[in-house]
Amino acid sequence: MTHPDLVGEPLIDAQAAARLLHLHPVTVREMAGRGEIPAMRIGRVWRFRASSLDAWVDSQLQWDRHPHSEDER
């Protein structure tokens, strides 16, 4: 029997991640391959945690709210 504390958040596939991010699944896989979004590759497929993607979106929104120099853009 598996201990409940050891069971992590389920992983989602690129289709579900794309729905969450409102992007095309191919775009999500490409972004994962470039390391732009939090993801892990298991075999030949990309897997994601919804909470990690949500945190990534929040971090992107925070970054966009702060003034930046032209060099950072």
Image (spheres, grey):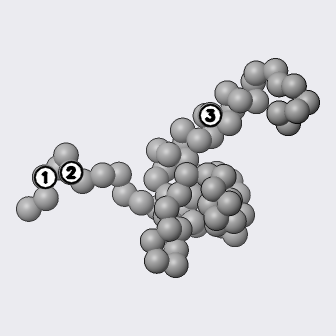
Q: Residue 59: which disc?
A: 3
Which residue lies at the image location 87% right of the left edge and 25% below the top edge? 69
Q: Which amino acid, mark 3?
A: Ser
Q: CA distance from mark 1 to mark 3?
A: 32 Å
Going from the N terminus, do you reach mark 1 or mark 3 first?
1
Where does residue 39 sit, x and y in percent of width and height? 53, 57
Q: Tell me if I can see residue 47 in this picture.
A: yes
Which residue lies at the image location 13% right of the left edge and 59% below the top edge? 2
Is residue 41 shown above or below 4?
below
Where does residue 51 sit, x and y in percent of width and height? 47, 44
Q: Nearer the viewer, residue 60 or 17?
A: 60
Q: CA distance from mark 2 to mark 3?
A: 27 Å
Please identify the residue farthest to the left as the structure is shown.
Answer: 1
Going from the N terminus, do you reach mark 2 or mark 3 first?
2
Q: Which amino acid, mark 2?
A: Leu
Mark 2, residue position = 6
The N terminus sits in image quarter: bottom left
Where does residue 61 sit, x and y in percent of width and height? 69, 32
Where does residue 40 sit, x and y in percent of width and height? 49, 62
Q: Nearer the viewer, residue 36 or 19?
A: 36
In this picture, residue 16 sits left or right of residue 21: left
The C terminus sits in image quarter: top right
Q: Residue 38: which disc?
A: none
Are circles 2 and 1 on residues that touch, CB within 8 Å?
yes
Q: Which amino acid, mark 1?
A: His
Which residue lies at the image location 46% right of the left edge and 77% below the top edge? 43
Mark 1, residue position = 3
Residue 63 found in image quarter: top right
Q: Secondary structure at mark 3?
A: helix
